[in-house]
Structures are given as structure tokens and as C-alpha cells.
Image (cartoon, rainbow, N blue to C red):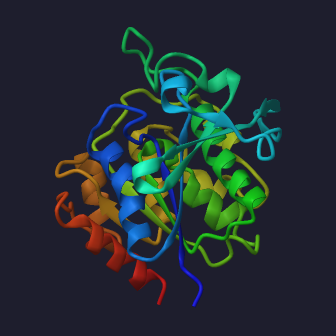
Amino acid sequence: MEKKKILFISQEITPYLRENEMSHIARYLPQGIQERGKEIRAFMPKFGNISERRNQLHEVIRLSGMNIIIDDTDHSLIIKVASIQSARMQVYFIDNDDYFQRKFTVKDGDGKYFDDNDERMIFFGRGVLETVKKLRWSPDIVHCHGWMTGLIPLYLKKAYNEDPLFAHTKVVYSIYNDEFTNNFSANFKDKLKLDKINNNDLLVCEKPDYFNLTKLAIEYSDALIKGNIKINENVENYIESKSKQILAYQNRDEYLDTYRDLYDSLLK
């Protein structure tokens, strides 16, 4: 029987970025699920504060070279990879000179959110899905971690849903205490549009803030996980209004088998 395939997409993964609830889960969950008999892939952004030399990243030439158009501008997609030897797993990194060379993640040295975080999020999400297409790897489940993955449920259910690789893919979205406090650009909705994504799909983004981005991710996900004990109160209330599979916060001693059981229930 062919192994089920789980694609993990995270804003942060330790040891490449500092450890917190999200980066810890995104590091050890793929390993644990692989050890429980499933095939896995893991992706994250190649932020400029990730040392390529220390972490032994190298470019995957056969996957790089595509262009992603955002707001009528071409941006080159560069794919890098590193191995976590103790886990027998690889991590793929989405890179681009315009978006991911600065020496910070989502804020500058003064603590101000980057004005182009919306485009960085779009580039990351589409970059992951285009790379998976190039790998010809069909995930049964895509598990997204953090707001920078928040457009992937929409893309999978609307723009990529007729692609044979993603036609039957289920989406799990983990919500963390990672709220950003600024709004995205006024033309955020226009930047999001792709074939089969129209204004009606994006009504929730009239005000492009954290709450509405998270609502968009929730709407197009098949199951939800509370990744922190405490998350945004408005998001918490919105989650509870949905008739979806919802997992409460799981501590580090219990989450692996609980998450595996959630995946298995979605694949029945």
C-alpha cells in the first residue's frame, strides 16, 4: 500500500530560526509523522537571517528558475534545501532576492513590519505549490503553520483544485499567537487574483488585516488546530462558529499521535 503524503509548510522551523511553539512543532512534527509511516516534505521561507553556510543550504538548480508574477512584476523563484540528519528529513527553502535577502523575518531592525509582507506571503505560498508541482509530488494533506501560509488554503481549493496533483488534497491550518498589527496594502485583493479566484472569493479581505486573513484561511481549510494555548480572541470566536474538525491546543507530549489521528480521519 502506498504511503500517504503529508506536506508541511511553515513560517518558521527550528533550528533555522529561534525556537518557539510554531518552529518547534514544524521541526518535530514532520519527523514524528514520517516515523509513523507517512511520506513527508517540509517548506519554509529562506529569510535572510538564516545562515546558508552554518546550516549547509544549497540551491536545487533543477527546481529553481521559474518566475512568479505579482502585481504585473516578475520575481524569480530560487529553491534551496538543507538536511536535518538526525531526523532523516530535508527542508526546502523558498528564496528570492527581492523578498528574502534582508537580515530579518517579517519586521525590520526597528520592529516595523515590512511594507511588502503581503507580496512576500503571496510569493511564498505560490512558490511552494509550484515547486511541489515540479517535484510531481501529490500530497494527500497540506498542513500550514503561521499567517505567512494563510493564502495556501485558498490557492489549493480555488486556483489549483483541478490540477491532478492537488485534486484530492485536504488542508489543515494551525493558528498561532503570531498576530501582526498592521494592514496589508490597499490593493491586496488585486494582487491575490489568479485564474478561478475572483472578487467574491476575496470579500473577507476588504480590510486586509490579520483577522480577515485568518478568516480566509479558515474558510478554505478542512480542519483547524489551535497551535498556542492563547490565540487572538476574535479568531478563537470565529473558529468556534465553524462546523469543521477543530483540535484544541495539544502539549508537546501528546500532539504527535493526536495530529496523526486527525490526518487519518481526513483521509478516510
Residue at figure coordinates x 83%, y 38% from the top left: 65
Looking at the image, which is closer to me, 193 or 153?
A: 153
State which quadrant residue 173 falls in. bottom left
Q: In the shown orientation, is residue 215 left or right of residue 97?
A: left
Residue at figure coordinates x 71%, y 64% from the top left: 160
Residue 241 place in picture, x, y as percent: 30, 68
Residue 15 place in picture, x, y as percent: 38, 37
State whether residue 225 appears in this view. Answer: yes
Q: In the shown orientation, is residue 97 left or right of residue 69?
A: left
Residue 70 sits above or below residue 151 on the image: above
Residue 96 place in picture, x, y as percent: 68, 29
Residue 236 sits above or below residue 136 on the image: above
Looking at the image, which is closer to me, 132 or 81?
A: 81
State whether residue 243 appears in this view. Answer: no
State which quadrant residue 31 falls in. bottom left
Residue 140 place in picture, x, y as percent: 57, 75
Q: Which quarter of the rendered picture does the N terminus lie within?
A: bottom right
State which quadrant residue 64 falls in. top right
Q: In the shown orientation, is residue 79 left or right of residue 227?
A: right
